Image (tube, rainbow, N blue to C red):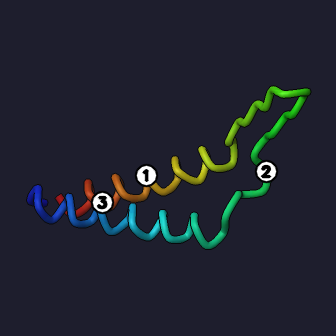
């Protein structure tokens, strides 16, 4: 796959993920711990979703290469 096409596919995928992220808002399942004036946020579910999306993108890029 040529570089311009690959960049367009990645850009489109990021656009779709960004749009869905805005529509859905915070994803349930992420860990948030608040104690006093300290907040700890660990986005475990978000990380898994991003990993799956990136894996699919790279799979399709490799398949059509």
| Tag nearer the camera, 1 or 3 | 3
Q: Is residue 28 left or right of residue 58?
A: right
Q: x, y (%) of residue 41?
A: 73, 36
Q: Nearer the viewer, residue 64 or 23?
A: 23
Q: Residues within 10 Å of mark 3 (few under 14, many from 20)?
A: some
Q: Is residue 26 above or below residue 46?
A: below
User: What's the CA distance linking mark 3 and mark 2?
Assistant: 26 Å
- Earlier sequence position, callout 1 versus callout 2: 2
Q: Is residue 51 left or right of residue 59?
A: right
Secondary element under disc 1, as helix, strand or loop, is helix
Q: Is residue 55 above or below residue 8?
A: above
Q: According to the image, label 3 marks what residue?
A: 10
Q: Residues within 10 Å of mark 1 (few under 14, many from 20)?
A: some
Q: According to the image, label 1 marks what residue?
A: 54
Q: Residue at x 63, y 49 (%)?
A: 46
Secondary element under disc 3, as helix, strand or loop, is helix
- Earlier sequence position, callout 1 versus callout 3: 3
Secondary element under disc 2, as helix, strand or loop, is loop
Please state, as top left, top right, bottom left or bottom right, where the C terminus lies in the image: bottom left
Q: x, y (%) of residue 29?
A: 79, 50
Q: According to the image, label 2 marks what residue?
A: 29
Quadrant in the picture for residue 10:
bottom left
User: What's the CA distance linking mark 1 and mark 2?
Assistant: 20 Å
Q: Residue at x 57, y 64 (%)?
A: 21
| Tag nearer the camera, 1 or 2 | 2
User: What's the CA distance linking mark 1 and mark 3?
Assistant: 9 Å
CB under 8 Å between discs 3 and 2: no
Q: Residue furthest front?
A: 37
Q: x, y (%) of residue 1?
A: 13, 60
Quadrant in the picture for residue 33:
top right
């Amino acid at each position: 796959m040529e570089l311009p096409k690959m960049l367009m596919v990645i850009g489109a995928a990021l656009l779709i993920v960004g749009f869905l992220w805005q529509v859905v808002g915070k994803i349930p399942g992420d860990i948030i711990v608040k104690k006093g004036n300290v907040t700890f946020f660990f986005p475990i579910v978000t990380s898994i979703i991003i990993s799956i999306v990136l894996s699919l993108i790279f799979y399709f890029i490799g398949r059509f290469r």
